[in-house]
Image (tube, rainbow, N blue to C red):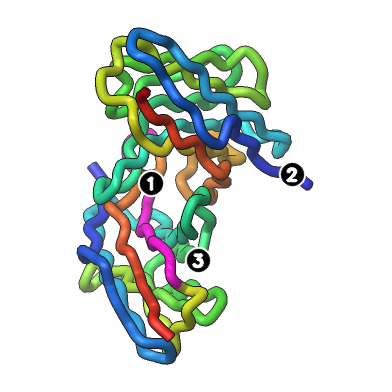
């Protein structure tokens, strides 16, 4: 079935550094791909999505491009802030179209 | 404002006790989900419901039960059969039963701990 694999964390960066969080997927066809973010003590919220190959999703300075050649959907941001510290989840529809999540990658940004 | 409300925020369970976590949504969504979150393990699906009066087991349903008597409500009961219930529980909903392109809306979670 469909699945995603995320890089292990935590990822620790200084403020204004460049961020990449890797996500690769295994899927039948070309399902929509998602990045969700979870701030401490809260539920998840959608950060961005891409619905077809070569699409780029973007929001709040974060970007991810749906690459079918490399089956990847890596999350990037050019300059992180302390407020970006959170856990980031890659996701896609699994069996019966139920959303399936990666293990999450914790990001810690120091001033 | 529309959204999903989970309660309580924190819950403590005694040995042998059943406890119920509440999840209510006013988004008029058909589909609702319960996930369990443990540190380093991501989200694991417990149960889901795509229509009123119907629900399906997810990957880790043992020791849990649900009901879906109303469209807006999807309570989760953690029974005494669940031997390791300490976790963060997340409820979510989406607008369509199938399709896969819809985003999930999440509640703010319930942290369940064993006394």
In the image, residue B7 lies in the stretch drawn in magenta: no
User: On the rendered image, what quadrant is the N terminus of chain A found in?
Assistant: top left
State whether residue A8 is above or below residue B89: below
Query: Which circle marks residue A93 in the picture?
Result: 1
- Chain bearing tag 1 is A
The stretch in magenta equals A85-96
Cβ–Cβ below 8 Å for labels 1 and 2?
Answer: no
- Magenta stretch: includes residue A92: yes
Q: Of the residues tagged 1 and 2, which is closer to the observer?
A: 2
Residue, disc 3? A48
Q: Residue at x 49, y 28 (%)?
A: B11
- State the separation of the CA atoms marked 1 and 2: 24 Å
Q: Where is residue B26 in the image (x, y as percent from the top left)?
A: 72, 35
Q: Name the residue under label 2.
A: B2
Q: Tell me, yes or no, whether the two marked residues, 3 and 1, touch with CB atoms within 8 Å.
A: no
What secondary structure is marked by label 1? strand
Q: Residues within 10 Å of mark 2 (few under 14, many from 20)?
A: few
In terms of depth relative to the viewer, which is nearer, A41 or B2? A41
């Amino acid at each position: 079935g469909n699945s995603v694999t995320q890089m292990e964390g935590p990822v620790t960066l200084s403020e204004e550094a460049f961020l990449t969080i890797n996500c690769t997927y295994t899927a039948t066809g070309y399902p929509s791909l998602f990045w969700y973010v979870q701030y401490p003590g809260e539920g998840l919220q959608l950060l961005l999505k891409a619905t077809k190959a070569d699409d780029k999703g973007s929001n709040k300075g974060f970007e991810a491009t749906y690459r079918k050649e490399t089956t990847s959907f890596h999350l990037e941001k050019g300059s992180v802030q302390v407020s970006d510290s959170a856990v980031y989840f890659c996701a896609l529809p699994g069996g019966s179209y139920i959303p399936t999540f990666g293990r999450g990658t914790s990001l810690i940004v120091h001033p | 404002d529309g959204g999903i409300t989970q309660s309580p925020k924190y819950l403590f369970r005694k040995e042998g006790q059943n406890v119920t976590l509440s999840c209510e949504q006013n988004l008029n969504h058909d589909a609702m989900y319960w996930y369990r979150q443990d540190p380093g393990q991501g989200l694991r699906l417990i149960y889901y419901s795509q229509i009123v009066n119907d629900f399906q087991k997810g990957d880790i349903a043992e020791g849990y039960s649900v009901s879906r008597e109303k469209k807006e409500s999807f309570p989760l009961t953690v029974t005494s059969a669940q031997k390791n219930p300490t976790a963060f529980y997340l409820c979510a909903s989406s607008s369509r039963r199938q399709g896969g392109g819809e985003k999930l809306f999440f509640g703010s979670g319930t942290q369940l701990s064993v006394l």
